[in-house]
Structures are given as C-alpha cells and as structure tokens.
Amino acid sequence: MEYQRIAARPNLRLNGSVALVADQCAALMIRYKGSQASATVTVVSATAITLKHGAAAAEAADTTVGASANGAVDFATDTTLGAVVDRINASPNWQAEVVDGLRADSVASSAMLARSETTLSPVRTQVLPLYWDSSAHLSLEYRIAAKRGKLGENPLRRRAGYQAFLTAVKALVNVGSGTLTLNIYDVNPATGVSTLLYSAAGTDNTELADPAFGAGSGAIISDFGHDLLVRYTMSVDLPDSGAYLRVVGYCQ
C-alpha cells in the first residue's frame, strides 16, 4: 500500500511556481459560509476588517464577528495575522486561513492593503484574498501549498500525502539601504508552527538567484503535509515598483 501511494504521487503534482511584485502577496483568504443572500468585506488598513451580511444592497454588520460583536476585526485588539484569522473563524458565518505569511506576523502599521467594500455571494467556492501592503509589511512572500486557494475543502483531503518542493528563487529589490534577507520556512498548516529551513543575505539592487539550497540537494522539501513559505524581507520600506519575487516549486 505504501509503495502504491508513493508510486502514484508524480501523477498528482500541483504547480507552485509564481512571479510576484509589490502588493500581490495574499495575507489571508476569506469566504462567507453563512445563510444570508449577500456579504461584504472591507479592509481599512490601519484599523480593521469589517464583515457584513444580509439582503443584497442592505448588508449590516455581522454581530457574530469581533471582540465587540460589531462586525469588525480590530487590529488594535487582534494584532497578529493568526489572531485575525482566529477571530474570523470564531464566527459561524465566515472562514479564513493564513496564506502568504506566518501567524506571528503583525497587522499593525497598515501592514494590510486597504480594500473598498467588496461583495461576496454565499457560494462555497468563492474565496477572496486580502493582501499585504508590501511597503508596510516589508516582505515579498509566497507559500507553496497543496491546498492554496481551496479554502472550502477539508484540509486533510489534499494535504496529508503531500510535500512542498522549492527548486529556485529569484528576487530583486532596490531600496538604497538596509538589509535584505531570504528566509524559507516549513509551515504546518494545521497548527501554524513554522521552522526556518534556510536563510541567505540579499544585496540591494542585485538579483538574488538560485541560492545554494542545503547540502547541494537541488531543492528544499517540506515535511509531509506541510507547506513552504518563501519570504524576501527588507529592513526598510519596500518600493511599490522595481521589486519582484519569483518562486519555482511544486507540491506532490
């Protein structure tokens, strides 16, 4: 049985490659799973995520959301990405999951990109990404994950037999000063626990390309059922132009 499972894995490969620029990294994914006809999501980057539901064009604050039951996930109260996701998931009407980030990441100082009121229909497969504001979050990052964007699915159905593979990274940032660091984490999606697997220094305005991943193996590989988070971090403001992160990898 184990031999058969391993032999079948190449036929189940899922692409994890991507090219990103500033403000394209998804902090979290969210969906509405309640019973109302319509729902909306608003992000005020310095303050809160506000969730409403009700009749179309007549949505009101979802009182199952927020420490004050006012429909708002307040960044002054829930100061980390993990706390924000936990607060959303405490409501029976919503589901959220950390994507390109770690649970300990701060959402203070306008780290999340503002989003005007966006309407979600109560459709199981409709998932809305909420993005980092890269110039405030100070990172470009991407998670190689078997269940990426599949928020409505049972995580165990697709994750249990998978590993994430990272074969190449290219990144460029021109900030003029400060420190650039590439960090690669193994992340347990069930618990949010992360382990730093690899770290390398970057150079301003010079492309960081194909780091010598551990012991010349040619790839960094996650534990079974885990994801890989690739993060290129700046110690000073990240520009909204002239910066990119390219990741080549897959899950299998």
Image (spheres, grey):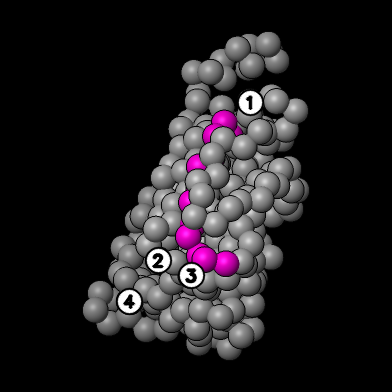
Marks 1 and 3 sit apart, C-alpha to C-alpha, by: 32 Å
In magenta, the rendered stretch is 166-177
Q: Which residue is mark 1?
A: 218
Give how far across and how far down residue 84 sits, in percent: 59, 71
Element on which disc 2 rests: loop
Marks 2 and 3 sit apart, C-alpha to C-alpha, by: 7 Å
Amino acid tagged 1? Gly
Q: Which residue is mark 2?
A: 240
Q: Residue at x 58, y 63 (%)?
A: 234
Give how far across and how far down residue 160 sits, in percent: 64, 34
Contact between marks 2 and 3 (CB within 8 A): the answer is: yes
Marks 1 and 2 sit apart, C-alpha to C-alpha, by: 31 Å
Q: Is residue 71 above or below residue 100?
A: below
Is tag 1's residue or tag 4's residue first in the polypeptide sequence?
4
Is tag 3's residue or tag 4's residue first in the polypeptide sequence?
4
Residue 148 visible? The answer is no
Q: Residue at x 60, y 12 (%)?
A: 7
Amino acid tagged 3? Ser
Q: Going by the image, does 55 lie left or right of 231?
A: left
Is tag 2's residue or tag 3's residue first in the polypeptide sequence?
3
Is tag 1's residue or tag 3's residue first in the polypeptide sequence?
3
Q: Which residue is mark 4?
A: 117
Element on which disc 3 rests: helix
